[in-house]
């Protein structure tokens, strides 16, 4: 087995405990397992009761843990690229601030190096299972969409090619005191671009990677979970499980909890309707705070005794291109979205899909060159876009 399972959800819903309980169970079943925290507010050390740092640490037999330090990773890989960026930033900054510190503040840079670390570990083949304990929803979305987003920008840059940079380099250095990347740095940048594409393929490989959502039966958390599900679907990630945490037992003989149980019942029904085709796990509200290995074992015994826990439990269809006569169709399943929220348009070879304040730019395949959007429809949470040849498209 070679698997990556990514846990995400709103802050405070119990992601770390549920992810760690999965890791512990897998290790006890004989799978060599690594649990990775990408949340800068790391708390694996607190939960597991042992020091965990920026290198893989053995916790128990078959169980290893890692709290990724993206700054550490950044300084220990892509060194030529870092030097090149330092020179570029020094020119723009004119010595006012440390250029490396400026680069570290670049939006998305932490997400990039966290993902590169996970990819490098997966490529070694040392582990059967990598469990990723992600930051809250918004940061997780930034983490998972960053490879595609940065690749999109780099594709705009790379047509210039190494030759153009090689020709321009002495000119910019002489007349502008601006030093463009040298050959070694360009090789590092190209290597980064290739790794980004490999990352996209890995994270969206439905035979390897899946996302599992953790939620609570509360209004604000349910609404964020619905948005999270929509975001994951929009970007093509496979969601194969949802964990509803802190569910009150209905047999409580205490009037204080009666209204809470009624409220939870409504949100439980809503979640089960939205995630009807995805395995759902209800986790009770425990009478104790679950800390340490003993606490995780209790969580495992009560909630995780389910078949095929570490397999791909369901496979969403993702984006689908199909031939339709002389035209082509692109289809998406977009749950928890209304037609009024959707905007679709084409910009050159990119298809832009916007839902509220979230936008995805999809680089269209070469076979659609010479085609453009002719029609888009949204029915039963299915977005269908038809592409027609430009010369054949009616006015």
Image (spheres, grey):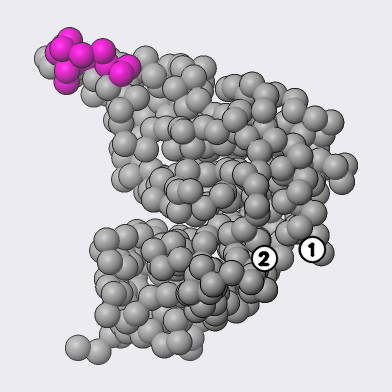
Look at the image and give the residue range highlighted in magenta.
Answer: 90-101
Instruction: Classify 10 Å Cα crowding around label 2: few (below 14), some (14-19), many (20 and above).
Output: some
31 vs 194, left or right, is right
- Which residue position holds label 2? 281
Among the 4 quarters of the image, the one containing residue 246: bottom right
- Look at the image and tell me whether residue 182 can be seen: no
| SS class, disc 2 | strand
Instruction: Classify 10 Å Cα crowding around label 1: few (below 14), some (14-19), many (20 and above).
Output: few
At which x and y percent is residue 377?
Answer: 36, 85
- Look at the image and tell me whether residue 232 can be seen: yes
Front residue of this view, candidates 360 and 374? 360
Among the 4 quarters of the image, the one containing residue 124: top right
Say which residue appears at 32% left-offset and 81% top-offset. Answer: 339
Front residue of this view, candidates 272 and 386? 272
Quarter of the C terminus within the rendering: bottom left
At which x and y percent is residue 254?
Answer: 59, 69
- Which residue position holds label 1? 306
Q: CA distance from mark 2 to mark 1?
A: 9 Å
């Amino acid at each position: 087995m070679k698997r990556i399972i990514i846990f995400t959800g709103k802050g405070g819903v119990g992601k770390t405990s549920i992810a760690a309980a999965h890791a512990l169970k897998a290790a006890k079943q004989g799978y060599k397992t690594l649990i990775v925290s990408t949340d800068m507010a790391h708390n694996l050390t607190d939960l597991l009761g042992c020091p965990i740092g920026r290198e893989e640490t053995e916790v128990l037999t078959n169980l290893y843990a890692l709290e990724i330090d993206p700054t550490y990773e950044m300084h220990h890989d892509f060194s030529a690229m870092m030097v090149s960026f330092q020179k570029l930033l020094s020119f723009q900054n004119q010595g006012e601030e440390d250029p490396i510190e400026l680069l570290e503040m670049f939006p998305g840079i932490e997400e990039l190096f966290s993902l590169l670390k996970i990819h490098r570990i997966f490529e070694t083949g040392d582990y059967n299972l990598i469990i990723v304990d992600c930051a809250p929803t918004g940061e997780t979305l930034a983490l998972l969409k960053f490879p595609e987003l940065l690749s999109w920008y780099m594709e705009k840059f790379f047509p210039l090619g190494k030759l153009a940079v090689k020709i321009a380099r002495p000119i910019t250095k002489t007349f502008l005191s601006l030093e463009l990347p040298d050959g070694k740095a360009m090789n590092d940048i190209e290597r980064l671009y290739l790794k980004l594409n490999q990352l996209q393929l890995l994270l969206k490989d439905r035979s390897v990677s899946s996302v599992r959502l953790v939620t609570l039966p509360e209004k604000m958390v349910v609404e964020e979970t619905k948005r999270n599900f929509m975001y994951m679907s929009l970007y093509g990630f496979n969601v194969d499980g949802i964990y509803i945490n802190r569910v009150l037992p209905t047999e409580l003989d205490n009037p204080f909890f009666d209204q809470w149980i009624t409220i939870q019942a409504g949100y439980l029904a809503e979640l089960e309707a939205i995630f009807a085709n995805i395995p759902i796990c209800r986790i009770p509200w425990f009478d104790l705070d679950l800390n340490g290995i003993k606490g995780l074992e209790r969580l495992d015994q009560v909630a995780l005794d389910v078949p095929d826990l570490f397999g791909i439990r369901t496979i969403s269809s993702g984006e689908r291109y199909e031939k339709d006569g002389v035209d082509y169709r692109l289809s998406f399943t977009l749950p928890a979205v209304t037609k009024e929220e959707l905007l679709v348009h084409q910009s050159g070879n990119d298809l832009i899909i916007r839902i509220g304040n979230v936008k995805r730019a999809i680089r269209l395949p070469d076979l659609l060159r010479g085609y453009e959007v002719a029609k888009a429809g949204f029915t039963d949470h299915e977005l269908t876009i038809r592409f027609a040849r430009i010369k054949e498209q009616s006015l």
